[in-house]
Amino acid sequence: MKVHKHEVIVVGAGGAGLMAALYASKGGADVAVVSKLYPTRSHTGTAQGGIGAALGNLDDDSPLYHAYDTVKGGDWLADQNAAMVLAEGAIEAVIELEHMGLPFDRTPEGKISQRRFGGHTSEFGKQLVRRACHAADRTGHMILQTLYQQCIKKDVNFFDEFQVVDLLMNQGQAVGVVAIQLGTGDFHIFHGKAVIFASGGWGRCWNVTSNAHSMTGDGAAISLRRGIPMQDMEFFQFHPTGIYKMGILITEGVRGEGGVLINGKGERFMEKYAPSVKDLASRDVVSRAIYDEIKKGNGVKGKDYVYLDVRPETVNRFFAEEGKKDRIDAAYVEKKLPDILDFCRTYLGVDPVHEPMPIQPTAHYAMGGIPTNVRAEVVIDENWTVVPGLYAAGETACVSCHGANRLGTNSLVDLVVFGRISGIRAAEYVRGVDWTPLPADAGKEIEAEFKRIRTSKGKTKPYELRARMQQVMMDNVGVYRTAETLQKAADEIATLRERFLTDISIDDQGYKFNTDLMEAWELGCLLDLAEVTALSALNRTESRGAHSRDDYPKRDDENWLVHTLIYREGHARDPKYTLNTKKKVDRSLEATDPRFAPKVRVY
Ligand SMILES: Cc1cc2nc3c(=O)[nH]c(=O)nc-3n(C[C@H](O)[C@H](O)[C@H](O)COP(=O)(O)OP(=O)(O)OC[C@H]3O[C@@H](n4cnc5c(N)ncnc54)[C@H](O)[C@@H]3O)c2cc1C
């Protein structure tokens, strides 16, 4: 196998990976970014609504309010120190992005324009505040392009279309990764002093999802297989507004601009569920409300969807009823939400300026993942024991600033704030340590696994297993769960995993761009993550944030202000899972400010 040597190896070229690479290289390190996608195709590029920062350009705002909303939105499971780092870092990060040339929308005075988003308030929940900085509804696209240009300027080494398939550890330290060059099928070893995982989420475990096909959680699954626990996997966010059946995301920015949810009876039902913030309640609340309406038979035409209505006449009617002075017209909607209009016109034949959009909740965002501290160092237990040389940032990481439910616009902040920290820290770390050699058998195990997948002569095609897994997860590990559904999911996923290991076959035996082979391997990652998600959810006997158990409907702060860590040991065919719930939530803000103490959620 060809061996490449770079001090810092960044896995992934989304917002988190590019920010990490930029800062590691600014810190003087020799950096390689290894990415299965061409960088600007990363999922960050699809982020629509905005990036939250308490700039206070339009309303009075402060990082403390932002941190409070983040902690409260996370249903008090967020580590409060991490939420504060996020909120304080957000302002600097947005200004830095602006200085790098990101074309934010502007106010008439030339300041960065900000809009309302779910759960963004000032004065500790008193009123909604405009905090989401945006470039129309293409904010992530602009972030990705801007950061990629900066990395090119800094001569960062890019290995595009190299898919990382294993993590190399030696003497308890991360020493590199193994990757397959997609264009040739060759294995390569990347030997480093530090590895940063920035490989994104795993929405593809579910069948209705906003996530791109590439969101298969490779980095998280690889880490799990190498002994790194996964944290808080039971918390996976369903975004309330995905295009019916397709799952394509309709940004919360639509509701931020005044759009409302309407049931089959023509009622604005969020008035019942969250009387003060209504359609801009946090995502878990809105997703549950939609499910409840559908359960009551209030779906549109008796089906399992409701409407999202941003027609100017509807929006203006509600603005007037609420005594708001704002008024919008068709031109405004066209200017603020161009991509959303385009998606609906193209994929649905629906024009949102004249018709309401049919929507349903869609699997969207992993709050859980590879556990880290606020320095983006990977930690493996309740004592915050650090794995030397291993870092994680972005959606694949769980720092945990989002707790049990992430607020809209906080992921983009997370990428730039913790991506940057991971780069700075990794550069410092590599300066102070010598090279640790590669393990003697580097790459052998994963090479054998690929040979198995390529040559297996089983009866099942991987896509059949994937479709089944996605349905099982949708039906049993969705917005609402019970012990029964979760056990059923865990059992069935284990059976699917067994079949994946013993009974598959693929059609393409070639080496160049063998997507058949790579998708089969990715299915293995999804199955591992689906299994730990179901098991972690089964273990948490309460309802909190995105984890809603019909059989334990109450939040239980007495016993459950702790993070879930799940470990995996043993052979892939017969893995042993261990759960640990001793890692306490950081409550450092609450220690000095009682407003940060957990409260019953009232909207
Ligand atoms: C449709 C949509 C809209 C969204 N809108 C918003 C929004 O408005 N505001 C907000 O805050 N958040 C939003 N989010 C969430 C946010 O965009 C994501 O959480 C975030 O972009 C993830 O960034 P990341 O850098 O962690 O990973 P990604 O951008 O997903 O990038 C992952 C990278 O890892 C690489 N990779 C993965 N596996 C491998 C492997 N095995 N080997 C090598 N490379 C690998 C990929 O090539 C890619 O470069 C949205 C998400 C979606 C899906």
Image: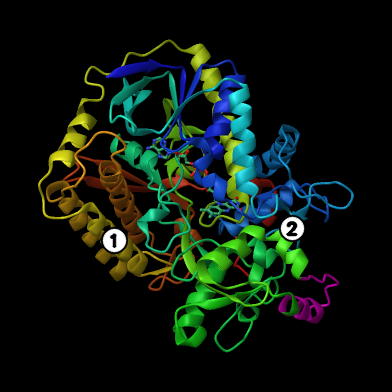
Q: In this view, does 70 lie to the left or right of 224?
A: right
The answer to whether the residues at label 1 and label 2 have Cβ atoms under 8 Å apart is: no
**Looking at the image, can residue 11 be seen?**
yes
What's the amino acid at mark 2?
Arg
Quarter of the picture containing the C terminus is: bottom right
Secondary element at image label 1: helix
Q: Name the residue under label 1.
A: 467
Query: Picture quarter containing residue 172?
Result: top left
Q: In this view, does 437 lie above or below 588?
A: above
Disc 1 crowd, CA 10 A, few/some/many (<14, 14-19, 20+): few
Viewer-side residue, 294 vs 515: 515
Residue range in magenta is 314-329
Q: Position of residue 473 (x, y in %)?
A: 33, 62
The answer as to whether callout 1 falls within 8 Å of ligand 1 is no
Query: Picture quarter containing residue 449?
Result: top left
Q: Position of residue 428 (x, y in %)?
A: 55, 18
What's the amino acid at mark 1?
Ala
Q: Name the residue under label 2.
A: 115
Quarter of the picture containing the N terminus is: top left
Q: Where is residue 41 in the image (x, y as percent from the top left)?
A: 50, 42
